[in-house]
Image: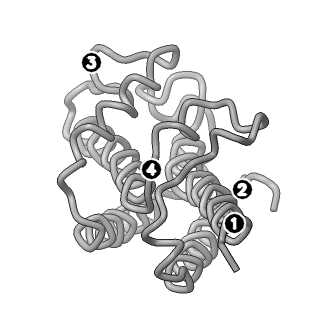
Amino acid sequence: MARPQTKSDMIIAATESYAKLMNLIEGMTDAELSTEFDFSKDENKKEAHWKRDKNLRDILIHLYEWHQLLIACIEANNAGEHRTFLPEGYTWRTYGDMNVMFWDRHQSTSLSEAKNMLMKSHEKLMGQMKTYTNEELFSKGVFAWTGGTTLGSYFVSAASSHYDWAIKKLKAHKKMVSRNRVV
């Protein structure tokens, strides 16, 4: 699917991608859930996240934390408090370090807690998404705090695009587990 350019397409993409992700998770076997992620043998998986995330909880927490970034940014700016999307101390060049910080923060979070946190943050993000007009979401310059991009672009990145990333990663894990299963 092409990157959404309208409010309705954005809502549909986020809803459908989230449902696909949840269905994929619900269909995971005990072996897939209990086997640690290990993509070290795949030379095509060079990005840091392939090494960082070790299980489903790590992926769900990553999604949750990126939801929280956007929710907090929107709420602060709507209340008149200038706040950038990335927390103080992080830039688009160093956001990988931020992702590691999120990972570290949640090593004692259970899978059940992570699922619940993601479900609630998804619902909140969708609620916020629906409060804006198409023009507010996809016209540049509407909100000074979005910089040179649109608010809709932030929503797409935090929701459907991130869900698609998680689906890709979980499918790769499932494939790896099935290949390594001893018959």
Q: Amino acid at mark 1?
A: Asp
Separation of residues labelled 2 and 4 (CA atoms): 30 Å
Can you tell which of label 4 and label 1 is closer to the viewer?
4
Residue topped by disc 1 = 9
**What secondary structure is marked by label 1?**
helix
Q: Quadrant of the C terminus?
A: bottom right
Residue at the spot x=61%, y=33% of the render? 140
Q: Amino acid at mark 3?
A: Glu
What is the x, y in percent for residue 24?
59, 78
Query: Mark 2 packing: few (<14 Cα in 10 Å), some, or many (20+)?
Result: many
**What secondary structure is marked by label 4?**
loop
Disc with the residue nearer the chain's start (3 vs 1): 1
Can you tell which of label 2 and label 4 is closer to the viewer?
4
Q: Amino acid at mark 4?
A: Lys
65 or 41: nearer the viewer: 41
Residue topped by disc 2 = 4
Separation of residues labelled 4 and 3 (CA atoms): 27 Å
Disc with the residue nearer the chain's start (2 vs 4): 2
Q: Give the label on residue 88, or none.
A: 3
Q: Give the label on residue 148, or none.
A: none
Marks 1/2 in contact by CB < 8 Å: the verdict is yes
Residue topped by disc 4 = 54
Residue at the spot x=71%, y=56% of the render? 4
**What secondary structure is marked by label 3?**
loop
Separation of residues labelled 3 and 1 (CA atoms): 32 Å
Q: Amino acid at mark 2?
A: Pro
In the displayed structure image, the side of residue 101 where residue 138 appears, left or right: right
